[in-house]
Amino acid sequence: MVKKEMIAMLLAGGQGSRLGILTSKVAKPAVAFGGKYRIIDFPLSNCINSGIDTVGVLTQYQPLKLNTHIGIGISWDLDRNIGGVTVLPPYEKSENSEWYTGTANAIFQNIDYMDSFNPDYILILSGDHIYKMDYEAMLDFHKQNGAEVTIAVMPVPWEEASRFGIMVTDEQRKIIDFQEKPANPVSNLASMGIYIFSWKTLKEALLANKEQPNLDFGMHVIPYCREKNYPLYAYEFNGYWKDVGTLNSYWEANMELVDIVPEFNLYEEYWKIYTNSKAMPPQYLSEESEIEKSIIAGGSEIYGKVYNSVIGGNVRIGKNTVVRNSIIMDDTVVGENCTIEKAIIAEAVTIGDDVQLGVGEEVDNETNANIYNHGLVTIGEKTVIPNQVTIGKNVCIGGLTDKADYPNGELPSGKTLIKAMDDLT
């Protein structure tokens, strides 16, 4: 029988609804990041850099782009005869078939996959965080303490602690209490959603709780292990870790990459971030182009001016166009004489000439102020924006739009404009 000391299970099935139109056609872990990566590249790279060569990727929502990106794992050196990377969507079973209904339910439905490697330990990861972490060091901590469950935690500001699952520990970092989003937290050690379980214990906990609706680690599996008095430990992580779950946190994380001294360094030789890169020609910067403090990926042609922005691959920015504080993803074309301020522009968007994005006062978005805020303009994949229109802040646009959609050539701040995408598929 195959024997692996530790295998990783990477939860990548979530929609990421707080990213709004960016995830209307694509799973959150497949969203582009940092010009040439996708969000899932970070946990996958952490695995191979930590010596973990067996990873199950649990997919569900809009998995096509994610599956294509992962392929057979060559980019991460995970194309192995035994182990490697395996995409695990929900599948039809003889007795009953169901979608993954919770984080732990997704793991429960893949018990046979995990059993096939006869592992000592299971590492549970989320596919939608930006960070670098050595899981081997966490495993060493798990073994040294004789733990059955180790939960990665990081200190958060006290005023934010009520937003997280909080671990209360003793001096040895043994967990003595677990508070889910407490009103009055007594600790500021927040769970990162990264767990190491001894396989025997995880299997027992999953089977004991399998009838729970929306079976979840924080709500069911970890409380079960506590009730059984299994030793639970908190592994403190103090590096960079970003949950890019909202448009603003996603925008901020990208903007931090172009800081003079970036807090999160993509250029470290000893901890590379691997990705499935398309073969692209080098970038081209014309004589009249001007670029400051920006990332420009391969294959892009810049004829305008780009400041403090992250530009993906195969992007074209026309003459006399000025882009500031923005994210523009792969295969997008921006016309001439445009101004773009604080925008997130998804893949394969076409923007006409003489377009102004992100102008005027901030007004709450009319359809979802909780998603479209902080003055951002968000444009969905394959959207078309016609020539000579002015677009405000906290705006969301998607689909094949034309002049008639912009009364007086304008879409004021706070508006949402979603047209059918059928013509674009």
Image: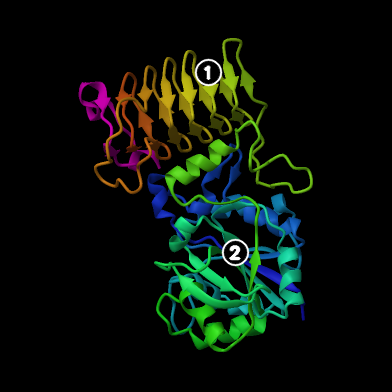
Mark 1 to mark 2 CA distance (whole Å):
42 Å
- Work out whether 412 lies above or below 20: above
Percent position (x, y) of residue 113?
Answer: 63, 75
Q: Nearer the viewer, mark 1 or mark 2?
A: 2
Percent position (x, y) of residue 128?
Answer: 54, 55
Q: Residue at x 51, y 81 (%)?
A: 223
Percent position (x, y) of residue 330?
Answer: 53, 35
- Work out whether 206 lies above or below 190: below
Q: How many marks?
A: 2
Q: Which residue is mark 1?
A: 305
Residue type at mark 1 is Lys
Quick one: label 1 or label 2, which is nearer the N terminus?
2
Residue type at mark 2 is Val
Q: Which residue is mark 2?
A: 153
Residue span colored magenta: 398-425
Disc 1 crowd rating (10 Å Cα; few below 14, some 14-19, many 20+) is many
Q: Quadrant of the C terminus?
A: top left
* Residue 404 lies in the magenta stretch: yes
Dot 2: element: strand
Q: Quadrant of the N terminus?
A: bottom right
Q: In the figure, residue 254 lies in which quadrant?
A: top right
Is residue 15 something that shows in the picture? yes
* Residue 309 lies in the magenta stretch: no
Residue at the far top in the pictured view:
287
Percent position (x, y) of residue 230?
Answer: 62, 85
